[in-house]
Amino acid sequence: YMEAAAQYRQLSEAGTAENMCVLALVLYRAGQYQDSLQAYEKALAVSVSSEDKAHIQAAIGMVAYKSGDVEAAKVALLKCSQVCDSRPGLQALLSVGILQNNNTLTTAVLQELDKMADEGSGEQAQADLALLTACLHVAQGDVQAGRNHLSRCLHRHPDCPALWRHLAQYLLRHLSQSCAAAAAKCARVANSATLCHDDSLALCCGLGSLGAGWHVHTD
């Protein structure tokens, strides 16, 4: 990574946001978080489009959180949500709140995301919000409530492959002892509704089938 960083430092002298972002990512991979933050800040200064600025702010939040500066991560993600489409930034901010057990932050962000869902949002965005809400239940010690929330969302949107995928992965991660068969079935439904092959769904299906004792095809 450091060799790559040295090469990209030369390219970044051109001052383009793209080159600076690549350098920042390489430095992040190398564990050089402060240098990575500086590179992202330089990229932010020369970026033009609002979408690029939002992505860079999200990256700054990621690096700040990884370096242990939670407050700086919150500020960057909040700025990200204010620059362009606020949903990705708010979802990342919600994730930070869940990881930090910050009920005040998670409640406030969930309210904003719920408003957006009511106003209309994409299928993937709604599925991701459902998963994040389920994760919040897990953080609060109620795994069953998380499963119930995902199940209710599926009843409302049974044609959403992302929700089937999220429920399959959730069951395998948190309720594999009792819900392996259900996880395998959810993964199969998601896979049948997905246009291209997805290795992660095949893995979920296989793990669920093994957990349920379906060791041969005829089962």
Image (tube, grey):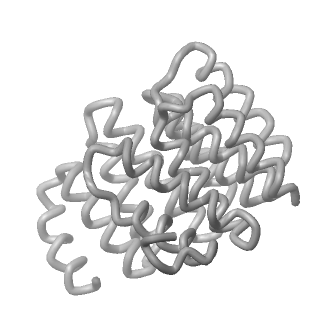
Q: Quadrant of residue 26?
A: bottom left
- Image coordinates for residue 123, horizontal then vertical, percent: 47, 30
Q: Residue furthest front?
A: 218
Q: Say if residue 136 shows up in the picture.
A: yes
Where 36 sits versus 163, above or below? Answer: below
Is residue 84 toward the left or the right of residue 135 in the image?
A: left
- Image coordinates for residue 207, horizontal then vertical, percent: 53, 74
Q: Residue at x 82, y 53 (%)?
A: 144
* Quarter of the figure that contains the N terminus: bottom left
Q: Residue at x 76, y 49 (%)?
A: 146
Where 180 sits versus 20, above or below? Answer: below
- Image coordinates for residue 213, horizontal then vertical, percent: 61, 77
Is residue 190 toward the left or the right of residue 51 in the image?
A: right
Q: Residue at x 51, y 59 (%)?
A: 62
- Image coordinates for residue 41, horizontal then vertical, percent: 39, 53
Q: Residue at x 52, y 30 (%)?
A: 86
Viewer-side residue, 95 vs 25 = 95
Is residue 85 toward the left or the right of residue 196 in the image?
A: right
Q: Say if residue 101 shows up in the picture.
A: no
Q: Quadrant of residue 53?
A: top left
Q: Residue furthest top?
A: 119
Total count of labels:
0
